Amino acid sequence: MTDRENRRTDPAEGAVAIEYRIGHLQERLVHEEIAEQGMRIEARGDTVVVTGTAPTTECRETIERVVREELAGVPVRTDIVVADSTAPDRSEELA
Amino acid sequence: MIRIAAVGDIHMGPDSRGVLRPAFETLHECADLLLLAGDLTRHGTPEEARVVADEVAGLPVPVIAVLGNHDHQDERPEEVTAVLREAGVTVLEGEGTVVDVDGTAVGVAGTKGFGGGFAGRSGSEFGERVMKDFMRHSRHCAEGLRTSLEELRDQGCAVRVALTHFSPVPDTLAGEPLEIYPFLGSYLLAEAVDTAGADLFVHGHAHAGTERGLTSGGVRVRNVAQPVIRRAFAVYHLEPGADRRRNADALAEASR
């Protein structure tokens, strides 16, 4: 086992690594073709949870692919909805 | 009654062509004008702007827009603006426009706005040049909003609406992480609208925020980011002169 692998098995060091990987994921989502800034990415225990609204199904698939690539080896849960583009069925009276 | 449709953060790209058009084609049944509260594109390219332009071209109601930070990403906001204007969209930055709705003058004042944070927890024009530039940009946007609302008042508009991308109040950011509030809006926008007066403040930008808020001066604020309103657009009904009546009521209350 190398020193690098040793560091990763240390629980305290592992937590820090996930924090930085979330930061790198956020940067990558902004700079990928979808320019996504609206995802909430949080570590919950040893799992990372990604939630938010994507403009289209294609964008959601891209986000999920980038998340999988960037957080390879980390348990990930995603709950990303696609924006609703139906006309409203009500209005708000502001008078 | 004036019916205002509004949506922001539609983040259109080639794969979203035509997604909003069916809903927009119902606008003549429920609204007198459509406001677009910025982040219309993903990277601010003219190609993405053309998708937005096609989505709103030839609609039966006037379309008025401000740009958002995403529409600046490619550093070609003038080209994005030009593409939208070619499609008949009125794009505002530090200026106002007047729409005649059945004889009632409806004024819309628009600016992208910017961040900086909220009263007591705000950045200042102090220190490094980039920090001064950041806060000056926010102040410049807010001043443009105030002066254009005042001009609309002087032009006799019966209804005035402020349209921005960034938020004027923390109310509509509830649900966003507190740590990023200074990147989501500025109290300078609220101060501008409370100084000049308005009937409604419409903004976007905060995808995880909430729809409803209020400035200290009593102006209703609505966050119309599409992930927040969860439909193609929201519709708000306003009675002409309600802003003046509220101000008169507030003065009467204060003088008791």
Image: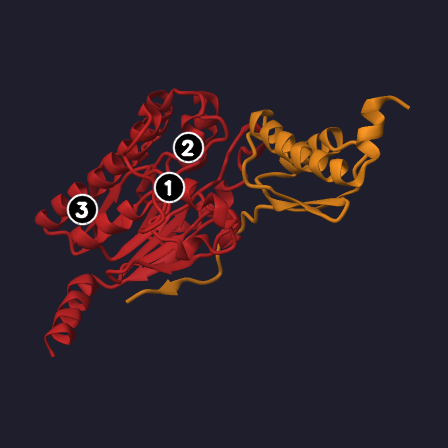
Chain colours: A orange, B red
Q: CA distance from mark 2 to mark 3?
A: 22 Å
Question: x, y (%) of residue B63?
Answer: 33, 41
Is residue B30 visible in this depiction of the protein? no
Q: Are marks 3 and 1 on the same chain?
A: yes
The outermost residue toward the right is A1
**Quadrant of the rendering where the N terminus of chain B is positioned:** bottom left
Q: Report the residue marked by disc 3.
A: B149
Q: Secondary structure at mark 1?
A: loop
Query: Pointer 2: residues within 10 angstroms few (<14), some, or many (20+)?
Result: many
Query: From the viewer's perspective, is residue B68 above or below residue B252?
Result: above
Residue drawn at (79%, 37%) of the image: A74
- Residues at marks 1 and 2 touching, judged by CB atoms closer than 8 Å: yes
Q: Of callouts 1 and 2, which one flags the residue occurring earlier in the amino acid sequence?
A: 2
Q: Of callouts 2 and 3, which one flags the residue occurring earlier in the amino acid sequence?
A: 2
Question: x, y (%) of residue A6?
Answer: 84, 29
Q: Of callouts 3 and 1, which one flags the residue occurring earlier in the amino acid sequence?
A: 3
Q: CA distance from mark 1 to mark 2?
A: 8 Å
Quadrant of the image occupied by residue B25: top left
Q: Report the residue marked by disc 2.
A: B69
Badge 1 sits on which subunit?
Answer: B
Badge 2 sits on which subunit?
Answer: B
Q: Left or right: B169 with respect to B47?
A: left
Q: Are marks 1 and 2 on the same chain?
A: yes
Query: Pointer 3: residues within 10 angstroms few (<14), some, or many (20+)?
Result: many
Residue type at tag 1: His
**Res B165 label:** 1
Badge 3 sits on which subunit?
Answer: B
Residue type at tag 3: Leu
Q: Left or right: B116 with respect to B103?
A: right
